[in-house]
Image (cartoon, rainbow, N blue to C red):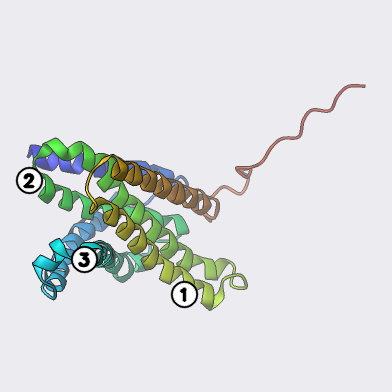
Amino acid sequence: MLTVLVAAAPSLGLLAYFYLRDRYDREPISCLLIAYLLGMYSMLAAQSMVVALAGGVSEEWLHLGGEPARLFEAFVLSGLVEEVAKWAMLMAAVYHWREFDEPLDGLVYGVTIALGFATLENVFYLSSHGVAIAWQRAVFAVPAHALFGGTMGYYAGRGKFAARSSPRVHGALGVWRDRILCLTLPVLFHGAYDFALLHGLNWFIWVAITALSLGFWVFVLRRVRRAQKASPFRPKTMLPSDFRLPPPARRV
């Protein structure tokens, strides 16, 4: 029970943070719960796919194959497989929900699915390696999953609604671009993150992981702000975030 609580705590904290970013039309808790459970299911599906793909290469090559083996493990067994499993849950189920009715919802649901995935993965990982490393997972691995999911969800939401609000700007080409970015960016981000980890945990790798994590945070939080501004539920009388009142006139 302690392992489960420690494993779930960072995911629940991050989920609350992103849920509160949806200021104007928050999602029903029941929908978030379903998306969270779908994320857990995607983790089990990803494990099955990893076993199937890893069976196509030798275990010796994975351990001794050098950079090609690391690239395969990071970008295929981790990045591609895990993000495809989350993407399938998002696009096959959540994308079509009636509650998914604004661009920011995509980001919120993408984060929720990713954190469901991260929670179950964390339970398995801490059960095998002990709770002593929980702080490392809470600071790096779990937030990374949330940011990959947020990136995925942002482009899913933008692709779903942008063509309706500005068809001349986006059109069919823009929709397909967002659908491609919805999957390819999380795969690339995830692969780069895991590729760095596969080179050991010396000080240089910790610096690289920290820099990557900060870069992901900046990337996703900027898209949170964009989605907030694009919300159709934003009060029409609200001043733009970059609005500045003119300076008072000087008396002559």
Residue 105: horizontal and vertical position, in percent? 41, 56
Give whichever of 87, 24 is nearer the camera: 87
User: What residue did someone put label 2 on?
Assistant: 127
Evaluate whether residue 19 shows in this view: no
- Front of the two marks 1 and 2: 2
Image point (45%, 51%), residue name: 219
How packed is label 1: few (under 14 Cα within 10 Å), some, or many (20 or more)? few
Q: Of all residues shown, which one is farthest toward the right?
A: 252
Image point (44%, 55%), residue name: 104
Image point (17%, 39%), residue name: 134
Q: Is residue 125 above or below residue 71?
A: above
Q: Is residue 115 above or below residue 52?
A: above
Instruction: Give the SS element for disc 3.
Output: helix
The Cα–Cα distance between marks 1 and 3, rounded to whole angstroms, is: 32 Å
Instruction: Give the SS element for disc 2.
Output: helix
User: What residue did someone put label 1 on?
Assistant: 176
User: For this view, does 2 lie left or right of residue 25?
Assistant: left
Along the polypeptide, which appears first: circle 3 or circle 2? Answer: 3
Give whichever of 60, 167 is nearer the camera: 60
Instruction: Give the SS element for disc 1.
Output: helix
Image point (93%, 21%), residue name: 252
Q: Which mark is residue 69?
A: 3
- Front of the two marks 1 and 3: 3
Q: Where, by quadrant of the figure, is residue 239 drawn?
A: top right
Mark 2 belongs to which amino acid? Ser
